[in-house]
Image (cartoon, rainbow, N blue to C red):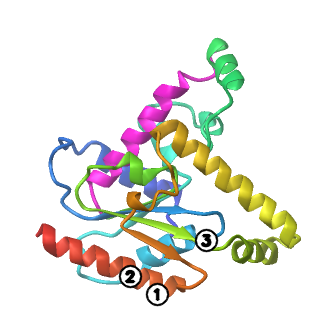
Amino acid sequence: MNATLTLERTEGYFTAEWHESRSPWVKAPAPFITISRESCAGGSRLAQLIAKKFNARASFAAEWSLFGGNIINQMLLANHLPAELARFLPEDKVPEVNATIGEMVGLHPNLWELMQKAKETMRHLASGGRVILVGRGANFATAGLAGGIHVRLIAPPAYRARYYAQRFGVSESEALLHNAKCDAARRRYVSAHFNAAIENPAAYDLVINTAQVPLEEAVEMVAAHVHAQSKVAA
């Protein structure tokens, strides 16, 4: 199975889960995973490999689903808002002047309200279990929900720059700059919306250096943690 879900499939999954009402204090019936990552540390690929591994096994009652950049699309869909608003919500806060102008001319609702809806979307997806949420401070958004396994991927800047340079055919100095900008944007995003430090190791169950730990081995580490927690919750 291809672990990268089509938009139609994720919309169907989201719609079903959204209408299943659960109180926030009820323990999650199944585990979920959040993945935070430094730029080019392998976050998206790890998520795909984990979903592929879990979905190939019969031990789970339902398939695992992936939500990354499409989390915002799902929030807009659930709240009957135009998909064009996604451009106002990158994984970094929108400059105040753009937000103010947009609200004045009616381009979008209050950006703070949209971010609250995005957090609610992540919590709703996680509360149903068997989902992998990549980025957007998902570990902070789902804090306090039972069943969560929170993972952060890191690697030395030079290692990540080599990967980006080889993949996109740019110089390593350009790759270093690109990754540094992405990392800074993600730090600002988490700081602005969760009042937290994305690098804080205490916010994660596993912090994995992908320059030292191959992604295939990282998959096994995460899977072992998921199964161990599932036994405790049973």
x then y, percent, for residue 217: 46, 87
- Secondary element under disc 2, as helix, strand or loop, is helix
Q: Is residue 152 above or below residue 7?
A: below
Secondary structure of the magenta portion, mostly? helix
Seen in the picture, residue 106 relative to 226 is either above or below; the reply is above
Q: Position of residue 65 (x, y in %)?
A: 40, 64
Q: Earlier in the sequence, mark 3 or mark 2?
A: 3
Q: Residue 217 got which mark?
A: 1
Q: Residue at x 65, y 18 (%)?
A: 100
Give the spatial CA distance, label 1 vs label 3.
14 Å
Please give the range of residues in magenta: 106-129
Q: Amino acid at mark 1?
A: Glu
Q: CA distance from mark 2 to mark 1?
A: 6 Å
Instruction: Identify residue for label 3.
Output: 41
Secondary structure found at label 3: loop
In the drawing, what numbered circle is on residue 221?
Answer: 2
Q: Is residue 182 left or right of residue 215?
A: right
Q: Residue at x 49, y 37 (%)?
A: 193
Residue ID at (43%, 78%)? 52
Quadrant holding the C terminus: bottom left
Proximity of marks 2 and 1: CB atoms separated by less than 8 Å: yes
**Residue 209 occupies which quadrant of the picture?**
bottom right
